Amino acid sequence: MATTPEFPSDLLAGQAELHQVRAELSALLKRLPWSVEPLNGFSDDLGWRKIERPASPGWTPDEQAEVEKLRRREHELAVFVSGHRFWSETTAADRVDARSKLKHAEEEQPPA
């Protein structure tokens, strides 16, 4: 596949939202404590590398709900994008290349 395929607008929109939801989820998880449940901190230097964690207050119910909401939406979008009718209309030999191009299609579009 030498040229970029003409992706349907709903597929492009779904992929763009999937990127956005994954970025939001990643940023949220980086801000949250390391443990969902409150746990004491620990230090372990018996393995091949030292691991230390401070005490974790756990996640609030609102934080848990936000993570669950984003994970659910991420799953919905991943199913939508991977199961889109476009893939059945694309030859098997071209699907991998087309999927790769779809993942980067947002980067290639000129700013509006």
Image (spheres, helix red, strand yellow):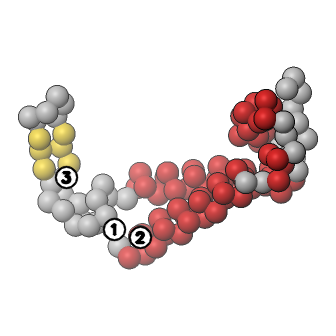
- Using the image, tell me which numbered label, if any, was put on residue 106: none
C-beta proximity under 8 Å, tags 3 and 2: no
Q: Between residue 99 and residue 51, name the one nearer to us.
A: 99
Crowdedness near tag 1: few (<14), some (14–19) or many (≥20) residues, C-alpha within 10 Å: some
Name the element at disc 3. loop
Name the element at disc 1. loop
C-beta proximity under 8 Å, tags 1 and 2: yes
Mark 3 or mark 2, whichever is nearer to me: 2
| Residue ID for mark 2 | 64
Residue at 47% x, 65% y: name it: 67
Could you tell me the amino acid type at mark 3?
Answer: Pro
Alpha carbon distance from label 3 to label 1: 14 Å
Could you tell me the amino acid type at mark 1?
Answer: Trp
Q: Is residue 64 left or right of residue 36?
A: right
Q: Is residue 81 left or right of residue 110?
A: left
Q: Is residue 11 visible?
A: yes
Relative height, residue 48 to residue 78 (above, below):
above
Which mark is first along the chain, 1 or 3? 3
Could you tell me the amino acid type at mark 2?
Answer: Gln
Q: Position of residue 27 (x, y in %)?
A: 49, 52
Q: Position of residue 88 (x, y in %)?
A: 82, 47
Residue at 73% x, 54% y: name it: 83
Q: Position of residue 89 (x, y in %)?
A: 87, 45
Relative height, residue 68 to residue 16 (above, below):
below
The image quadrant where one finds the N terminus is top right
Which mark is first along the chain, 2 or 3? 3
Crowdedness near tag 2: few (<14), some (14–19) or many (≥20) residues, C-alpha within 10 Å: few
Q: Between residue 82 and residue 43, name the one nearer to us.
A: 82
- Using the image, tell me which numbered label, if any, was put on residue 59: 1
| Identity of the residue furthest to the bottom in this view | 61
| Residue ID for mark 3 | 54
| Identity of the residue furthest to the top in this view | 2
